Amino acid sequence: MKLLERIFGREGASAPRPSANAGYLRDSRSRILSTRGTALRDHRDEVRTAWRRAAGLAMDIIQNSGRLRGAVDQVIADTVGVELILNPMPDLAKLGYDRKETDDFIKLLKAEWKRWAWNARECDLKGKFIVPQKVDIALRHDVVFGEALMLMDYMSAGDRRRYGITSGTKMCLTTPTALVQDTSEFEGLYQGVIHDPNGRPVAYRLAEKETGIVVKRDHRL
């Protein structure tokens, strides 16, 4: 028996062609469509599934590639340089300020910003980083994780006296990995972000360490 007879049951027969038909996803003779499994999912579900591994790979590659690390450094240098420059443009005419008084107020505001932003004890809740350092870290977080997370707090008068500082507003930079990946439609919670009935974000749920135990806390926007 010839080979074609063994395959097709008759001598000299050619391979059968698929019948012509109209419609989506018509396959070819290679059967490439029928052998490729796919699933149509919400983009948010795709992000939730891949985010942690993608972020880990991005962090590892940047840390171990001198070229990519240099590229990130260049992006940050091109974005903010050595620091963010405060550029207030208040309209104080309705408060009775003339042009000279407005200019004097802007100069005072810039001087106070400089004093606060370049003093880690004044601007940082933990007293470790000045604002330019926080901006640098936040941009690196944005490159790796796709987001940067910072908490704002207010220090009481008693704590300020104890530390010998004057300003109450404090910022605390937090790693985006602290944002839990929990999802609960009942709570309006999706990947650590709590939404109101209209779908607007109202709080973040973070995993924080307290006396050696990880606890989850909600931080209102």
Image (cartoon, grey):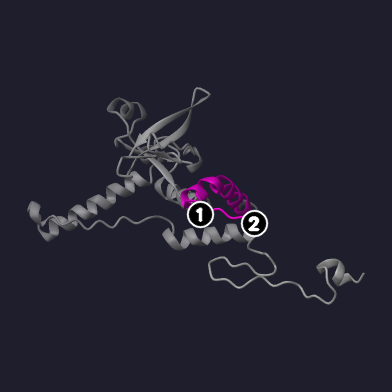
Precedes in sequence: disc 2 or disc 1: 2
Q: Which image quadrant for residue 34?
A: bottom right
**Relative depth, front residue between 190 and 69:** 190
Furthest residue toward left: 96
> SS for tag 2?
loop
10 Å neighbourhood of mark 1: few (<14), some, or many (≥20)? some
Q: As displayed, is residue 166 above or below residue 111?
A: above
Element class at badge 1:
helix
Mark linked to residue 29: none
Which amino acid, by three-letter code, is at mark 2?
Ser
Position of 166 with respect to 136 (left or right) is: left
Which of labels 2 and 1 is toward the front?
A: 1
Name the image quarter holding the C terminus.
top left
State the residue at coordinates (81%, 68%): 8
Q: Which residues are magenta?
A: 37-62
Q: Nearer the viewer, residue 143 or 185?
A: 185
What secondary structure predominates along the stretch shown in magenta? helix
Query: Callout 1, which amino acid?
Result: Val
The structure residue drawn at horizontal position 70% and vertical position 68%, both measured from the top left corner, is 30
Residue wearing tag 2: 65
Task: Tell me the residue at 87%/67% (across/down).
Answer: 6
In the displayed structure, 49 sits above or below 184; it is below
Per the model, the C-alpha gap separating discs 2 and 1 is 14 Å
Q: Position of residue 73 (x, y in %)?
A: 53, 58
Horizontal and vertical percent position of residue 18: 66, 70
As for residue 58 lying within the magenta part, the answer is: yes
Count residues near mark 2 (Cα–Cα under 10 Å), then give few for <14, some for 14-19, many for 20+. few
Q: Which mark is residue 143?
A: 1
Whether pointer 2 and pointer 1 mark residues with C-beta atoms closer than 8 Å, the reply is no
